[in-house]
Amino acid sequence: MANIYLYIGEEKYLINHKIERIIKEIKVDEYNIFSYDMDEVNIKEAVRDASTPPFMCENKVVIIKNPKFLTNDKYDIAHDISSFMRYIENPMESTSFIINCSGLKLNEKSEVVKLLRKKAIISETKEISETEFYGWLRRQCDLEGIAIKDDALKLFYNMVGKNMINAKTEVDKLLAYVEAGGTITSKIVNDVVVREIQQDIFALSNSILDHDREKTINTYRDLIAVDNDVNRLFNLVSRTIRDTLLVNLMLEEGAKQNDIATKMGVSPNRAYYLIKNAKTIDIESAKEYIIKLGNLDYKIKSGQVDAKTGFEFFLFQL
């Protein structure tokens, strides 16, 4: 087995699956698997662990996730990059060091990334295509002896999207709902599956801020196609753009994830996604659209325009 593995790409579910598979191949017991979140601890802690022999076993696995020091993203911990680079040059023979970079874009100009490109076994996982998603879903059903109709397959995809972690959660609900030998229909999908709308709202809001008219209209039509209420979409988009701007301003003032979660009255997980989204937006565009959406909200509530007409006019005029 190799000593250093680097997993990159956007599809977190598939990357996690690959990591689980390589751990099984290494044949290491649970007492010799150690995981570190680089948002919480210094890389030197993982390096120190990786440099020690395994406990009553031939092999050890050390996994790090969220290594933002390999990107251009901001991070709060002063990571000991030098010790990490020394380890990469001379890794412990009995340790398999796994670097989970799912969802991160590497800074190819950094010395540590250049070194990893030379020394690590690299696995890149690309976003799954719609056709591949259909194949994956059918295989999940086949394993349980359950059939799924074509229209139900497409509806599930439209409701859940390409986020495989969400998709796995929802397909497990479906398989638990339908007995072996049964068939999943569109009605069952509508009854059981919860649409992960917030991801779509982020996508819609960001396309508005990017002035991407085509993507905005396509995303909006996809949301309407599965019976989302226009008033709800309008309110969610307005709130998301407002919250994203507020988070951006708080980040500029030095606020951390827990601070933002407390001030916004949201969970730390929700705060994480707000922060991630806030780092990508154009602040001036956000300010401009908050004013426009505020004016539209007034016109809707005062009866000057109905929500559907007003919101669609706003989107189509980007």
Image: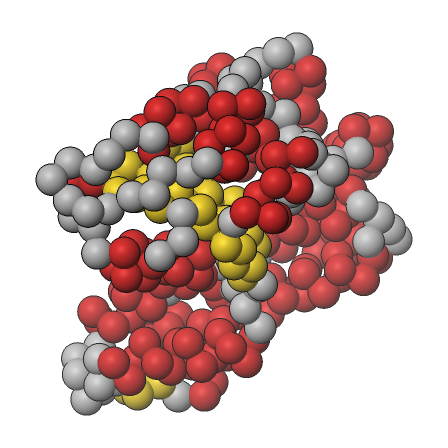
Compared with 41, 137 (above or below) is below
Q: At 50% across and 54% down in the image, what residue appears?
A: 121
Q: Quadrant of residue 116?
A: top right
Q: At 39% across and 88% down in the image, what residue appears?
A: 149
**Depth order, front residue of 126/314:** 126
Q: In which quarter of the image is residue 184?
A: bottom left
* Image coordinates for residue 255, horizontal then vertical, percent: 57, 14
Q: At 61% across and 40% down in the image, what residue appears?
A: 115
Compared with 147, 112 (above or below) is above
* Image coordinates for residue 132, horizontal then vertical, percent: 51, 77
- Answer with left or right where residue 34 lies relative to residue 105: left
Compared with 263, 291 (above or below) is below
Which quadrant is home to the N terminus?
bottom left
Q: At 28% across and 66% down in the image, what residue appears?
A: 172
Q: Can residue 12 be seen in this view?
A: no
* Image coordinates for residue 91, horizontal then vertical, percent: 42, 38
* Image coordinates for residue 17, horizontal then vertical, percent: 37, 60
Q: Is residue 118 visible?
A: yes
Q: How does the figure colour the protein chain or chains?
A: secondary structure
Residue situated furthest left in the rendering: 56
Residue situated furthest top in the rendering: 253
- Answer with left or right where residue 85 lies relative to residue 189: right
Compared with 278, 1 (above or below) is below
**Depth order, front residue of 316/176:** 176
- Marks counted in the figure total 0
